[in-house]
Amino acid sequence: MTKDKEGEDAPSRLVYVCEGGDCSEKGSVDLYEDLKAMLEEEDPTHRNKLRKFPCFGGCAHGINVVVFPDRCFYSKVTTADLRDIVDSLVSKGGRVDRLTGKVEKDVEQITYDLLTTGF
């Protein structure tokens, strides 16, 4: 576990950006690069690891971003949302609620199960 800006233990997270066909058509490749640049600048401890994911199955609600192990499934993410997401990742802020709850609960659960098993 790394330390946050206040010297307290901070959880490590994996931040996944969907690269499936629908999400990539909506701009997920560029969004990933923008998020990567923001995290490199604002997360000097690198506690948030950014990854690409082939598809979460929430295509109608893309671009999708999942934060694990927080079990946070963001949908309809745009570049304009990245500031709020990064702020929540590097501070003790909570989720960006306006981006949650859009995909079916079973899609979220399958995603969390796959990430938990190391798929």
Image (cartoon, rainbow, N blue to C red):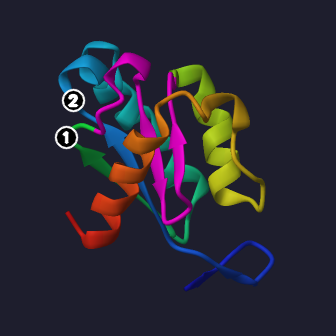
Residue at (56%, 61%) from the top-left corner?
70
Secondary structure under the numbered disc 1 in the rendered image: loop
- Please state the extent of the stretch shown in magenta in the rendering: 56-77
Provide the residue designation for mark 1: 54
For marks 2 and 1 on the same chain, the one whose residue lies earlier in the sequence: 2
What kind of residue is marked 1? Answer: Pro
User: How busy is the neighbourhood of tag 1: few (under 14 within 10 Å), some, or many (20 plus)?
Assistant: few
Q: Return the x and y of residue 81 as percentages of the image width and height.
A: 61, 27
Provide the residue designation for mark 2: 20
Q: In which quarter of the image is residue 45?
A: bottom right
Judged left or right of residue 20, residue 39 is: right
Q: In which quarter of the image is residue 92?
A: bottom right
With respect to residue 68, does 103 lie above or below?
Answer: above
Q: Is residue 117 magenta?
A: no
Judged left or right of residue 23, residue 31 is: right
CA gap, disc 2 to disc 1?
A: 5 Å
Q: Return the x and y of residue 42 as percentages of the image width and height.
A: 60, 53
User: How busy is the neighbourhood of tag 2: few (under 14 within 10 Å), some, or many (20 plus)?
Assistant: many
Judged left or right of residue 90, residue 27 is: left
What number of labels is visible? 2
Residue at (29%, 33%) from the top-left corner?
57
Extreme residue toward the front, this view: 106
Q: Which of 116 and 26 is in front in this view?
A: 116
Do the residues under discs 2 and 1 have CB atoms within 8 angstroms? Answer: yes
In which quadrant will I find the N terminus?
A: bottom right
In which quadrant will I find the C terminus?
A: bottom left
Q: Return the x and y of residue 51 as percentages of the image width and height.
A: 31, 52
Extreme residue toward the top, this view: 25
Q: Which of 94 and 3 is in front in this view?
A: 94
Q: Can residue 46 be seen in this view?
A: no
